[in-house]
Image (tube, rainbow, N blue to C red):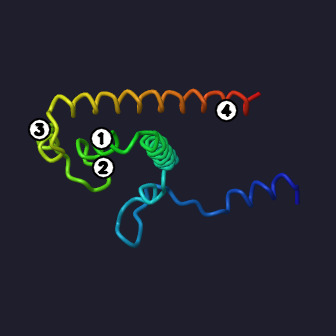
C-alpha cells in the first residue's frame, strides 16, 4: 500500500463534528459553549484598569478620597450629591466642588503617569 494513500485514508476516516451542532445538555450550538479570546482579553483589560484606578486613588489624601468615594459611590457607599455631601461634612457646596476638582486632577495626572510608565516598560520589552 502506498504511504500517501494510507495517510489520505486515515485523514478522511476521522470523525468531524460541526460547531453548529446542537449540544446534548441544553440544546445550544457547540460554538456558543466555547469561550472567546476577546472575552478573556476584555476581562484582563478590565482587571488591569481597575488596578490602575485603585493605585491612583491611593495617591489621594484622606479628605479628597472621601469626597470622591461619596460623590461616585465607591467602596459600597451610596452616591451623594455635592449638596448632601456638603451638609454631612459641614462644608459649603463650593468647597466640595473644589475638592472634587482637585482630586480628579490628581487622579488624571496619576493615571497619565502610570500609562506613560507602562508605555516605557512595553517599549523596553519589545526591544
> Which numbered marker is on residue 74?
2
Residue bearing mark 1: 68
* Quadrant housing the N terminus: bottom right
> Which numbered marker is on residue 83?
3
N-terminal label among 4 and 3: 3
Residue at the farthest front position: 90
Q: How many marks?
A: 4
As measured in the structure, the alpha-carbon distance from the residue carrying label 2 to the one carrying label 1 is: 8 Å
* Mark 3 crowdedness (10 Å alpha carbons): few <14, some 14-19, many ≥20: some
Residue located 11% across and 38% down the image? 83
Residue bearing mark 4: 121
- Name the quadrant containing residue 75: bottom left
Residue at the farthest bottom position: 25
As measured in the structure, the alpha-carbon distance from the residue carrying label 2 to the one carrying label 3 is: 18 Å
N-terminal label among 2 and 1: 1
- Name the quadrant containing residue 33: bottom left
Looking at the rendered image, the disc whose residue lies closer to the viewer, 4 or 3, is: 3
On screen, residue 106 versus residue 93, left or right, reads right
Asked if disc 2 and disc 1 are in contact, CB closer than 8 Å, the reply is yes
Give the structural element (helix, strand or loop) at label 3.
helix
Give the structural element (helix, strand or loop) at label 1.
helix
Amino acid at each position: 500500500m502506498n504511504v500517501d494513500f494510507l495517510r489520505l485514508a486515515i485523514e478522511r476516516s476521522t470523525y468531524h463534528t460541526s460547531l453548529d451542532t446542537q449540544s446534548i445538555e441544553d440544546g445550544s450550538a457547540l460554538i456558543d459553549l466555547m469561550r472567546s479570546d476577546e472575552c478573556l482579553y476584555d476581562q484582563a483589560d478590565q482587571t488591569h484598569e481597575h488596578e490602575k484606578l485603585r493605585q491612583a486613588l491611593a495617591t489621594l489624601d484622606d479628605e479628597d478620597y472621601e469626597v470622591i468615594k461619596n460623590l461616585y459611590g465607591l467602596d459600597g457607599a451610596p452616591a451623594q450629591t455635592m449638596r448632601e455631601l456638603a451638609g454631612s461634612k459641614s462644608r459649603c457646596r463650593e468647597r466640595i466642588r473644589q475638592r472634587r476638582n482637585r482630586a480628579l486632577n490628581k487622579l488624571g495626572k496619576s493615571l497619565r503617569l502610570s500609562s506613560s510608565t507602562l508605555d516605557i516598560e512595553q517599549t523596553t520589552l519589545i526591544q
